[in-house]
Image (spheres, coloured by chain):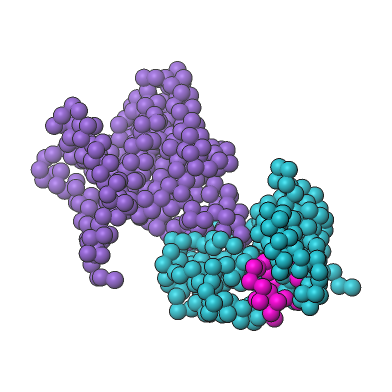
Chain colours: A purple, B cyan
Amino acid sequence: MKALSVSKAVTALVLAGLVLLPLYSQLSGNIFILTLFTRIVILALAAASLNLIMGYGGMMSFGHAAYLGIGGYAVGILAQEGVGSGFIQFPVALAASALYALVIGALSLRTRGVYFIMITLAFAQMAYYVASGLARYGGDDGLTVYKRSDFFGLIDLSSRVQFYYLCLACLFGVVFLIWRIVNSRFGLVVQGLRSNEQRMQAIGFPAKRYQLVCFVISGTMCGLAGALLANNTDFVSPAVMYWTRSGDLMVMVILGGMGALFGPVMGAVVYLLLEEFLSQITEYWALIMGPLLLLIVLFGRGGIMGLLGRADRG
Amino acid sequence: MAEPLLRVEKLVRRFGGITATDHVSLDVSAGELHAIIGPNGAGKTTLISQLTGHLSPHAGSVSLGGRDITYLPAYRRCALGLARSFQITSLLLDFTAADNVALAAQAHAGTSFRFFADARKERGLRDAAHAALDRVGLSHRADVVVSRLSHGERRELELAVALASKPKILLLDEPMAGLGATESQRMVKLLQDLRKEVSIVLVEHDMPAVFALADRISVLVYGRVIASGDPAAIRGNDEVKRAYLGDQHVVTRHD
């Protein structure tokens, strides 16, 4: 093994860039870039959580955006009802996401393959329509969050820089947890089940309960992203749960490299930056984005991290 | 009389109109190597799958150490000391050989709901894995990803995985399948060693191997046990000769 590989160097560079970004934003006076990157960091967190079940667990969930909505609505609804403390809002967001994941997972994991993809999609669309029907909380139009979560002055979420660092800390925390999990006993079982479920049953592992726990962990992490996202946009609407958003998350994971620890972070950064810049050049940015993604998926198996890994091997 | 370790009574399994397992009864005592032979399509793998819990029988019972396990799921049977190898190699292809075996050890060493500590650094599991790999002569290939192992090595790894769960009884579904002559010889030697430690049910096509290894042989034809006895008795049994061992006409006529 080389001391410094291309993939590690590039990953380190991107992470350093994320850490130093507020500094650049301050020096250059470019506030927009900080707003953009706050969103990127939050969606990278969501993608990282999806990577846990999709990349490591082999569970192709096509309804992951539901947690963004559940986490977001937990914050929005509590704020609307006068509960502004983040110490209540965030735990409720996580618990609601975990509960949703537990129920959906228990039902969805009875199926495999395409059926699993379709059933997770169907449940997320149900969540979308339920949110659209919440007349008291804005229905279709969504819900404005007038005041960001309050952490008793420990951290001020209305400060762009502090909020950015909170999101970044959450992202790093979640990636660290995922790193521990995938190398733990539990993580090896989940990855074994992805590789060969029959074999894992034969050596004594009941598949479903491990997959369900993994599904719940992943959903809870994504609920955190949802709570942050509602604070970032000061707004939550059913649109955040729409199936195209679940698709975006899947693309980020695949683009970055499934089952690579920092893959989703790379995927989110590249995908959202491309979206941002291409949409400035042309209204038909999706026409360029689509083929570009196709090329990376077709020729860069393992996504960006796969390509970098190949560069390492020369 | 001591209770046999594994007892199969009047097991029946149908697929549509075909009775793949037709009232099969057999016993395996502790320390015994019981071979099951029979022509292709005799229902050997169907029988094994019902013993391991991958397939449910329509009637009859299977008991392990006096305990009825007929409808227990595969993972529970494994916990009770029943391990299997697959006819078509079934391993975790993107894991190393050591990881494959260590996971089997892990399944029998406390809870796997541990989320934080690095499982690959657990001494107990790694030692168990290396011991099992050593047993089958694969310790020098421990850190190789399974997809890069040869077919023969994968067959040996199958055995190491089964051993790592410290089974009371091993169900081996054609461990010699696809092996070359020297590899087969190594496998026979290995099984000769193993049988001193664990009871074995062996399904195998390689007749010299079966007759060299088995204490008892049951002959399965069209889902039924037509004969059961020690190798000498089976060799001398006319019905077996006709159905299986020599007389091709009888076999092909039914095809």
- Quadrant location of the N terminus of chain B? bottom right
Name of the residue lying farthest toward the right:
B1
Q: Which residue is painted at 43% across and 53% down in the image? A: A56
> Is residue A298 in view from this perspective?
yes
What residue range appears in magenta? Answer: B196-219
Q: How many marks?
A: 0
Q: Which residue is painted at 33% across and 37% down in the image? A: A248
Residue A243 lies in the magenta-colored region: no
Name of the residue lying farthest toward the top:
A135
Vertical comparison of B127 with B50: above or below: below
B182 vs B15, left or right, is left
Task: Give the quadrant of residue B38.
Answer: bottom right
Q: Nearer the viewer, residue A48 or B230?
A: B230
Q: Nearer the viewer, residue B99 or A94?
A: B99
Spot occupied by residue B102 in the image (x, y as percentages of width and height): 53, 69
Vertical comparison of A63 with B203: above or below: above
> Is residue A88 in view from this perspective?
no
Vertical comparison of A236 with B111: above or below: above
Spot occupied by residue A246 in the image (x, y as percentages of width and height): 38, 35
Q: Which residue is painted at 85% across and 69% down in the image? A: B3
A111 vs A174, left or right, is right
Spot occupied by residue B248 in the image (x, y as percentages of width and height): 69, 64
Name of the residue lying farthest toward the front:
B249
Residue B204 lies in the magenta-colored region: yes
A293 vs A188, left or right, is left
Q: Which residue is painted at 22% across and 53% down in the image? A: A14
Spot occupied by residue B180 in the image (x, y as percentages of width and height): 52, 74
